[in-house]
């Protein structure tokens, strides 16, 4: 586990971020807005998969939800714990794979801003900041696991909220969730300019047919799926 003695970076909203931890961006805010519209409170058990700074988990904790957050990065775990202490909010933060760390537990709500950027590597990164965004050649390595595992994580009537890039295929996500017995829909969208990661991969993305040559804006989508 990394030392929290290293100087963290201050973020808007009073959050801190340790080395290499994904900073809240438009996708985080879009998912936070979607979560704000939901009826959650002290009786809500909520899981966040891939918590990063803990921004979404703490957003739910402010409303009284009992929140468990999971991340594969020790830097993220330390950051989320640090932010929970700083804001004096209760938050259980676990290190490791979300399926292994939540085996046998069910929640009312599952929230995730997973890695979703397509990349040419055949293997996902095992360390470093790229773990927060690299998600295989189609960007779906983590998305598909969440879709498949959602029914086992949710109580009847519970729901999943997940954000990802439109280039990963919102239709594919909806089909997978429907295929495991959930009712799924796109509830929000946003257009954001390409960041440095996508710009650095333009030629590869074009060869894969994932983007057009002149494309400079990325569509983000929020998926909501309810378990019957």
Image: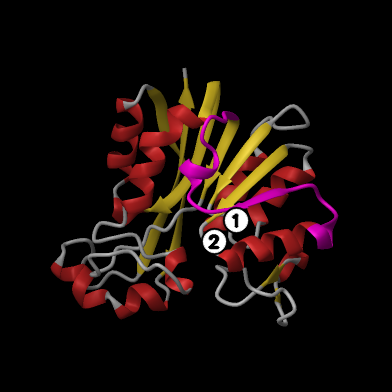
What residue does disc 2 label? Answer: 26
Label 1: few (<14), some (14–19) or many (≥20) C-alpha neighbours in 10 Å: few
Q: Is residue 224 left or right of residue 25?
A: left
Q: Quadrant of residue 167?
A: bottom left
The quadrant the N terminus occupies is bottom right
Q: Residue furthest right?
A: 88
* Disc 1 element: helix
What residue does disc 1 label? Answer: 29
Q: Position of residue 219 (x, y in %)?
A: 39, 57
Identify which residue is drawn at 42% across, 64% down. 133
Q: Is residue 95 left or right of residue 88?
A: left
Nearest the camera: 102 or 118?
Answer: 102
Nearest the camera: 143 or 6?
Answer: 6
Q: Is residue 183 left or right of residue 207?
A: right
| 184 falls in the magenta region | no
Q: Position of residue 163 (x, y in %)?
A: 47, 49
Identify which residue is drawn at 77% across, 57% down. 84
Identify which residue is drawn at 31% across, 51% down. 140
Vertical placement of 17 versus 189: above or below?
below
Task: Identify the disc placed on residue 113.
Answer: none
* Disc 2 element: helix
> Do the numbered discs 1 and 2 sit on residues whose CB atoms are within 8 Å?
yes
Q: Position of residue 130 (x, y in %)?
A: 42, 71
Q: Which residues are magenta?
A: 85-107
Query: Is residue 188 visible in the rendered structure shown here?
Result: no
Nearest the camera: 80 or 55?
Answer: 80
């Amino acid at each position: 586990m990394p030392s929290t003695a290293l100087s963290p970076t201050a973020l808007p909203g009073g959050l801190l971020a340790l080395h290499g931890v994904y900073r809240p961006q438009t996708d985080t805010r879009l998912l936070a807005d979607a979560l704000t519209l939901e009826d959650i409170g002290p009786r809500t058990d909520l899981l966040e998969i891939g918590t990063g700074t803990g921004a979404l988990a703490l957003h739910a904790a402010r409303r009284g939800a009992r929140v468990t957050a999971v991340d594969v990065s020790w830097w993220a775990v330390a950051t989320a714990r640090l932010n929970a202490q700083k804001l004096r909010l209760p938050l259980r933060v676990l290190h490791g794979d979300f399926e292994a760390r939540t085996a046998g537990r069910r929640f009312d709500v599952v929230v995730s801003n997973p890695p979703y950027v397509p990349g040419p590597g055949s293997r996902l990164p095992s360390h470093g900041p790229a773990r927060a965004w690299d998600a295989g050649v189609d960007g779906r390595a983590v998305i598909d696991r969440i879709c498949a595992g959602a029914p086992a994580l949710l109580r009847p009537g519970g729901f999943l909220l997940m954000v990802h890039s439109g280039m990963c295929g919102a239709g594919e996500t909806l089909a997978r969730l429907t295929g495991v017995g959930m009712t799924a829909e796109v509830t929000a969208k946003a257009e954001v300019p390409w960041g440095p990661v996508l710009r650095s991969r333009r030629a590869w993305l074009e060869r894969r047919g994932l983007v057009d040559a002149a494309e400079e804006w990325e569509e983000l989508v929020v998926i909501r799926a309810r378990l019957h």
